[in-house]
Amino acid sequence: MSDVGRWTSNRGISAAVAAVLALSGCAPLVIGAVVAGTAVVATDRRSTGTQLDDKTMEVRIANELTTALRGNDIHISVNSYDRRVLLTGEVPSEAVKTEASAVAGRSKDVRVVSNELVVAPPSSFGDRTEDSALGARVRAAFVNTKEIAFNSVDIVTERRTVYLMGLVTQKEGDVAAHVASRVSGVKQVVKLFDVASADEVNSRRSGTASANPAAKPPSTEPAAPVTPATPPATPIR
């Protein structure tokens, strides 16, 4: 059975999610694989309640996938940011990949599903360890980049592809993608941001915006391609 849980660290949130996990059973999936980031709840652009909802959603969907895909040789990581669910990992067929999307999409309160699963044998423990180390290097690069607000981007690393999630401005998203693409070992960068204006981001940070993303959703249009002076060799999409 695959390891369960590399979720963002906060004692209150982790304890609540652990309670959900204890009730629902151990799922052979990786839940909340936000690699190389320790969340500081006070600086996250989501409310504490939304962060808890996201972590609970990850556990629930992992268990729903386990039940629906029982008997298949799978490795699926489930991550959620503001009810946007990201599925990464390996499945045995396109049919299983499609079914995984359907299962996640039917789960309670899911806003959108980004299915980045690949048809391939499950990755090895060594591969996943390397992904964790790669994610740590990306996080370190972000910490040293003043244009990226601390704790504003979640990093998920799978098969040397870096997935970036969060509520960001256009500039923040472009800078984050460019910085990640320059980290040694990164094969590809995929942007899964909710893009908003600086005013919208600041209102969410200060808690003046609606806690319900459906009430006033930020733009989910993909950020424009990064065009640095020296284009990175790593593809960005």
Image (spheres, rainbow, N blue to C red):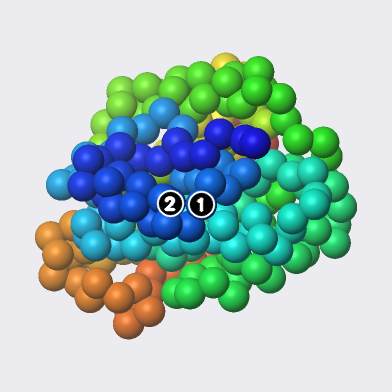
Whether residue 44 is situated above or below residue 195 in the rendered picture: above
Whether residue 189 is situated above or below residue 211 in the rendered picture: above
Residue 209 horizontal side relative to residue 9, left or right: left
Separation of residues labelled 1 and 2 (CA atoms): 6 Å
Instruction: Write the residue at 30% across / 57% down.
Output: 52
From the image, tell me which residue sits under label 1: 25
The picture places residue 21, in percent across and down from the top left corner, at 43, 51
From the image, tell me which residue sits under label 2: 21
Residue 141 horizontal side relative to residue 44, left or right: right
Specify whether residue 187 is in view: no
**Mark 1 surroundings: few (<14), some (14-19) or many (≥20) residues within 10 A:** few
The picture places residue 213, in percent across and down from the top left corner, at 34, 73
Query: Nearest the camera: 224 or 186?
Result: 186
Mark 1, secondary structure of its residue: loop
Mark 2, secondary structure of its residue: helix
Residue 131 horizontal side relative to residue 153, left or right: right
Instruction: Write the residue at 34% across / 62% down.
Output: 53
Q: For the residue marked with disc 1, what is the amino acid?
A: Gly
The picture places residue 165, in percent across and down from the top left corner, at 45, 49
Query: Nearest the camera: 195 or 79?
Result: 79
The picture places residue 35, in percent across and down from the top left corner, at 46, 33
Query: Nearest the camera: 182 or 54?
Result: 54
Query: Nearest the camera: 198 or 191?
Result: 191
Q: For the residue marked with disc 2, what is the amino acid?
A: Leu
